[in-house]
Amino acid sequence: MDAHARKAIGFLLWHLAAGVGGAAVLGGLVLWFDIGRLRTLIWSTGEPALALGLFLFGLFVTFGGCAMAAGVMAQGRQDRR
């Protein structure tokens, strides 16, 4: 793999990590404050680990994808002053 490809993959992984971090914070806050009684619903199911995993996976995929897309789309931007 050449240097350009390594740099591009690093760029995407950095943005993915930022998105996953944001998703973890949001998911934690939603569960901490029991917004929409979601924490109560998750813990009252027969398989709370599965419900929690699906909730967090959905957030990680969504936020990670949005952060990577925003990073890619911002590449061509030139600030005009």
Image (cartoon, rainbow, N blue to C red):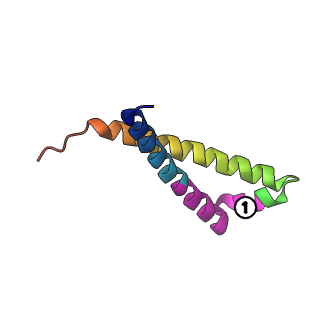
User: What's under tag 1, amino acid-wise?
Assistant: Arg
Number of other residues with Cα within 10 Å of mark 1, as a class: few under 14, some 14 to 19, many 20 or more: some
Comparing 1 with 78, the one in front is 1
Comparing 65 with 36, the one in front is 65
Residue 65's spot in the image, x, y percent? 51, 40
Residue beneath the point at 84% across and 59% down: 44
Location of mark 1 (residue) = 39
Element on which disc 1 rests: helix
Comparing 70 with 16, the one in front is 16
Considering only vertical position in the picture, is 14 above or below 78? below
Residue 27's spot in the image, x, y percent? 61, 58
Q: Which residue is most to the front?
A: 2
Which quadrant, please, contains the N terminus?
top left
Q: Which residue is most to the right?
A: 46
Relative horizontal placement of residue 76, taking residue 32 as reference (left or right): left
Residue beneath the point at 35% across and 36% down: 73
Residue extent of the magenta highlight: 21-41
Residue 19's spot in the image, x, y percent? 50, 50
Let me know if residue 23 is in the magenta part: yes
Quarter of image, res 58: top right
- Give the prevailing secondary structure in the magenta stretch: helix
Residue beneath the point at 25% across and 39% down: 77
